[in-house]
Image: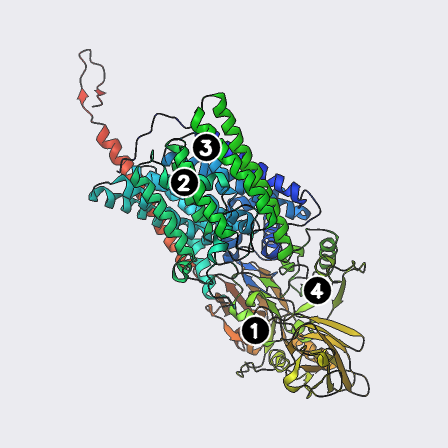
Amino acid sequence: MVRTAPPDGRRHPAGAAALLAAAVALTVYCAAGILARSYPFGPHTRTVNDLGNQYVPYHAHLWDLLHGHTDGGLLVNWQSGYGASFLPDLGMYLGSPFALLVGLFPRDQIDLAVYAITVLKIACAAAAMAWLLPTLRPGRWWAAGLLGASYALCGWTLADADYNLMWLDGLIALPLLCLVGEWTLQGRRRLAGVLIVTAAWIANFYTAYMATLGAALVLLLRLLLARPSRREALATAGRAVLTAVLGMGLAAPLAVVIYMGTKHASPGHFRQFTRAPADDLFARLLPTTYGFGTPGLYIGITALVLALALPFHRAVPGRVRAGWTVLVLAVTLSLQWAPTSLAWHAFAVPQGSSYRQTFVLCALLVIAAWHALAYGPPDWRTLGAATALLALITAVAGRSTLVRPATWQVLPLAVVGTLGGLALLYRAGPRTRLGGLAVVLLLGTQAGEATVTSADTIKQRLELLDDYAPWGQRQDRQAAAIAEADGWPRYRTDPGREQTVANDPLLVDGQGAQYYSSFTSDVLFRTFTALGGGWTSGGRSVQSLDNAVTDVVFSVGARVHNPPDPHRTHRPADDGPSTVTRRAVPPLVTVRSASDAAPFGPSPYRNQELLLGTRVYTVPRVTVHDDTGRPVADGQVGSGNARTRPTVTARCPAGTQVHLWAPYFSGTARFSGVSARFQASYPRNRAAMAPLGITPASGQVSIQLTPNRPSSIPAGAVGCLDTAGLRTAAARLTATGATEVTVSDGTVRAQLPAHGKGIAVLAAPRIAGWRCATGDGAARPALNHHGLVAVPLDGTSTSLTCSFRPPGLRLGTGVGAVSLITLVLLTVIPAVRRRRTSRTHFPVKEPDGERAKDLIS
């Protein structure tokens, strides 16, 4: 084993440091919410972007699972995307043990539950870092607590992670994995180390990968600084690799499923890496700066000054100063280079911010600051050099637009408090009243500065990002309407096209097309795009499609219609209730005479007919005119004053329902008293097809458009639906469909009419993992019928069973089992050997004839 530097005589009460760090982080974060008047301390919502669209709904779904109130189980989520694999989502968004705490809160307080989990995670991250620091180098317990809070309240946490709360598991994991590295250096606690690695990778696969890389860099530096022999170095590296491999292996049943889920997910449309300018990079080190897409490097002025002082601190050994300084600079550069940025993100271009690994750099800065203080407070000369570097950083950062007036108000106070506290500490020492005053000044400066920075970040983020209201009357109304109409699995109840968040089915129940996840399947994305569906987030967020034909195809027997969300539209609330449209639809399993091999074409109306099996649309020729009556070339609208109120004209059979398909149009369309909103911003967003009014007796259709940005109208934009023909088609599919369907988690069973031939079609996306069997036959991979699950019929079987197993589950389980067996053997065998070698038995006959005794050598 490698012998690390011996303690310098000062003992560290780890528990006190961890408690102080957790208390400071918790107090600051809550105080910032109070100052910003943010939920749950004020009227302003904190639910922005993916927190509202993904994480709150997923935690609501977990609440339902824990209380047995959901459709589906661990394998299949029947509420989203008309049937989605759930294990990848569970591992990505709900793998943290903290997530289970949602079960302790009322269902309508799900936002409060998520907030409580967020605060608890931040406090635990602070405690974990405070516990780690003295193991690297003994020092003052209050300093460990202060720097632990600095790490947990870094700019990455405040700006990015507190609304991507599963990332906070990586914030906790990094110091714990570094602690495992210390145990590896000392050759002890293998079992605990493996279990920590496993817990980290189960809690959040994504950030655990980054945390593992960061901890490996720290271990490598610690190994270089310890200067062991080659044999000791190789032994330590071997122990570290074995610990990591076994830990990841135990997490494989979930991790492999997550990895395979990404392989079958929609590729999306993502931006390439863009390096942050130097002035923005330096600006994010300062308080009250915020910029989406730039690294949140803020760790507090006290920690920053100490980190800047490290290279000049003569009391710190030269190798230590050089090692930590070089590591910090190297990781900083790695954030700014596309190949290394890709490596940090597991070789997948992230959607949104390209600096999700920033918490690793924040940890290294905090560790560097700890070394600058653990060897003794920096002297005047060292503080002067650090202050000069801070001034240079501030001068460069001053050119950035991220620096705001609030920065110039907070920064001087923080600098004065930091320099004053460190100067008093150097002069007085920790055991005098002057030293106590220094501690109070440093802690007060850190807490005040972080509180203002966090509150300011909350306000700026709310101005720049999309936001959503917490659970309220609108969600109560939606949930009540869905519960009253629910008939699963006889038919689906779609929560509606006018959504509150992108995962409405998870939040308010029902079984809809809406689905927003990193694992949104490519087959779902392509199928709904071909059918005229809309999506956002580059194709990862599929929206509900308000269309009678697709409702028949997917057995949507009830559809909820909601008024626009006043929180999103910023208009007065519509007091009208949520209404429900009911429709006679076939069962989930239908029988088709044969599989049509024709691929989807460019027209969503014809593609819908392929799935339906019947012609029900008239697709007329359309003409687009500007507001002066002149034809518009190539359907381009929304650019130029003469095209502000264009019109789409066509002729349809009288009495048919008019639909408009305009995937690249943004604005409103109106016909026969019915209006619809379209929201397109390609390649990020695509507008969904929308139903309009009924064709008059004249057959003349004139759709008035009000574009709000340059848009285009395709040639086959208008479709005229024969509603009577659709009812006939639905009745025919019902008559030949399954007589009974039961659904339990990942298994669907159906009773079919006798002598059925052709194919049976399950109204669910044909995602990878479906296997089906008829009668007593063997299960085989399901067929793909235009994106839906299908199985051929032999004319004799009257039963159908389709089962779903996520790709990678068998492989992951096997890897997990091998890892578990290996860990047990590596734990038990050495223990048995130690016990045998430590006990030598010598039978001795006592003179008085008593029984023999064993002497322990």
Q: How many neighbours does mark 3 have within 10 angstroms: few (below 14), some (14-19), or many (20 or more)?
A: many
638 left or right of 837 in image: right
Amino acid tagged 3: Ala
- Give x and y (percent) for residue 362: 45, 46
Q: Residue 510 appears at what percent x and percent y? A: 66, 60
Q: Along the polypeptide, which appears first: circle 2 or circle 4?
A: 2
| Residue 141 visible in the shown view | yes
Label 3 vs 2, first from the N-terminus = 3
Q: Residues within 10 Å of mark 1 (few under 14, many from 20)?
A: many
Structural crowding at the residue carrying mark 2, measured as other residues with C-alpha within 10 Å and reported as few (<14), some (14–19) or many (≥20): some
The image quadrant where one finds the N terminus is: top left
Which is closer to the viewer, label 2 or label 4? 2
Q: Amino acid at mark 2?
A: Ala
Image quadrant where residue 79 sits: bottom right
Q: Nearer the viewer, mark 2 or mark 1?
A: 2
Rendered image: mark on residue 143: 3
In x, y percent, where is residue 371?
38, 37
Residue on which disc 2 sits: 385
Task: Using the image, tell me which numbered label, if any, was put on residue 527.
Answer: 1
Packing grade of label 4 (10 A; few <14, some 14-19, many >=20) is some
Precedes in sequence: disc 1 or disc 3: 3
* Depth order, front residue of 60/224: 224
Please determine whether, in this image, residue 242 is positioned above or below residue 502.
Answer: above
In the displayed structure, would residue 753 be above or below residue 1?
A: below
Q: Which mark is residue 498?
A: 4
